[in-house]
Amino acid sequence: MKQIRSGVSPRSAVAGLTLLLVALIAAACFSGLPVGPRRVSPAPTAGATAIQPVPTASPTALVPLGPAAPTAAAQTEMVSNIPVGVDADGNFYRGNPNAAIKLVEFSDFQCPFCARHVLQTGPLLEETYIATGKVVAYFRHFPLQQLHPNALPASKAAYCAGQQAPRLFWAMHQWLFANQTSWSNAADAATRFRQTALSFGADAARYDACVRDPQTEARIARDLEDGMKLGVQGTPAFFINDWFLAGAYPFAEFQKLIAKADQGLRPPPTPTPLPPNVQPYDANPNRPGFTYDGSPSLGERQAPILIFVFSDFGCEACVEFARTVQPVLQDKYVKTGQVRLIYKYLAVSAPQTALAAFCAGDQDKFWEFADSLTANQGRWQEGDRAAMADYAKVLGLDVVRFETCVADAVGQEQLDADMALAEQIQVSQVPYFLVLNPSAQSGLRVPGLIAVEQFEKVIQDLQKPQSAAPGAAGQPTPAAVAVQRADQPVGVDMEGNFYRGDPRAPIRLVVFSDFQ
């Protein structure tokens, strides 16, 4: 049985939602380019996006992955009984160049998440796959210079050492990541890189000539351009044959994709793009009651306030919300067109029940089925398919279709996507709510169950007109205090918030942070 597909993959909803979030911490270093999309944990280890299809083309089309065997122009050496080399296109690799599985990594030597991958996950990949000849790993440069001013000098250092011998590239690679904190903010980083390269055996004159050569930076820029063509927007990012993985994911995620690549599986085609000016969380007029990304939605399409409800049918506090708070919100705000609810599955304790709710939604009865589960809490158990079928029958659903949908776990992709989104934006408990005003680009997090009166206050606060950006009329307001630094204006607005940059800029970036 096939899941109903919308015009956008559920996983791509991460991109639209993150544009509305004020504070978002992800295990990846971002390029600042427009952002394109399983566990729930307080300290996520996943990256910017979850497992997804290659954004544009197969890596074999745009990313030179090396010939089937080293050509005459290629160099190959052995380091710890593992072949290391540079292919005919100048890409450094480790492992058997004839391996059927090619792992291409786009990385930034100054990115802390790249270092975490190399130091924590890298040894497991090497031991399990690279040293055994099953996988060949390629390194591609993706220095994010706006974030990491020493990243490009580090890339040039590793590249130039590697021009003398591939083993020197990998020696520099390991040293740069292992010692990242000591040179990241150093004013003399290039000097340190040179000293280290020479200590590994690089010839000083050849190294210096390579670093000065404009072609060196051009070669690194080519890697950066290739990555951007493939949809890479942050580091680390990986292509495992045709599969794409963005972020410092744990070893288990690589195992899954390597297994798929080993079986010859390929990701599904890229979904049909959304219509112009449409976000994944917008109500889908072609499928009433759902968003474009397939999430159950309740309320008017044009409601100014969105409430994302991250919930689990097996969670007592979630049930309490559904029984006491949600009915009030529906009567006072949803039915009056002020609020639209969007349900996100965070099925930690009741994943089978969540799949059943998804399958009820497949027949346009998600909210009714959810109400049945709430009303009968304590009378059903997780995995009780007979009880789920009974509730489906009472609602007048096609029970055969419903049971087939549940048995085939048709909704697993949606559940996985919601889990990935929760991890991405650090939703670490259920229930959890994001209350957003998209037009004002503002929102509030509500972690856990709160009284209905508090919820109403959150909604009412977001309905109030937002304070204009400093100088929205063209100049900073008289109450704003500003000083001019050599590189950019800094100041404090009428509400006492410190800012950097042009106060008349049309886009505001608000960061909530902790100095420790």
Image (cartoon, rainbow, N blue to C red):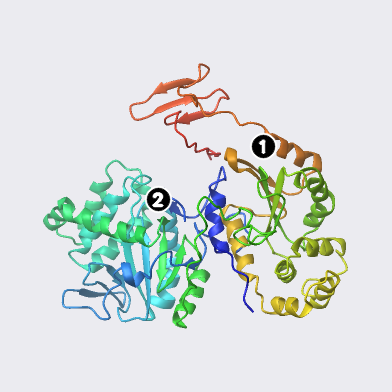
Mark 1: amino acid: Leu
- Distance (Cα) linking label 2 and label 1: 31 Å
Check the image and report above or below for 318 versus 444: below
Q: Nearer the viewer, mark 2 or mark 1?
A: 1
Pointer 2: residues within 10 angstroms few (<14), some, or many (20+)?
some
For the view shown, which residue lies furthest in the top direction?
478
Q: Residue 342 at x, y = what percent? A: 68, 54
Mark 2: amino acid: Ser
Question: Mark 1 sits on what residue?
Answer: 462
Q: Residue 44 at x, y = what percent? A: 56, 57
For the view shown, which residue lies furthest in the left direction?
205
Q: Is residue 215 left or right of residue 458?
A: left
Nearest to the observer: residue 9 or residue 238? 9
Question: Mark 2 sits on what residue?
Answer: 31
The reply to whether residue 336 is in sight is: yes
Check the image and report above or below for 135 versus 369: below
- Kindly identify the residue that appears in the image at 51 percent across and 69 percent down: 253
Q: Residue 506 at x, y = what percent? A: 47, 34
Nearest to the observer: residue 70 or residue 10? 10
Q: Secondary structure at mark 2?
A: loop
Pointer 1: residues within 10 angstroms few (<14), some, or many (20+)?
some
- Kindly identify the residue that appears in the image at 60 percent across and 43 percent down: 438
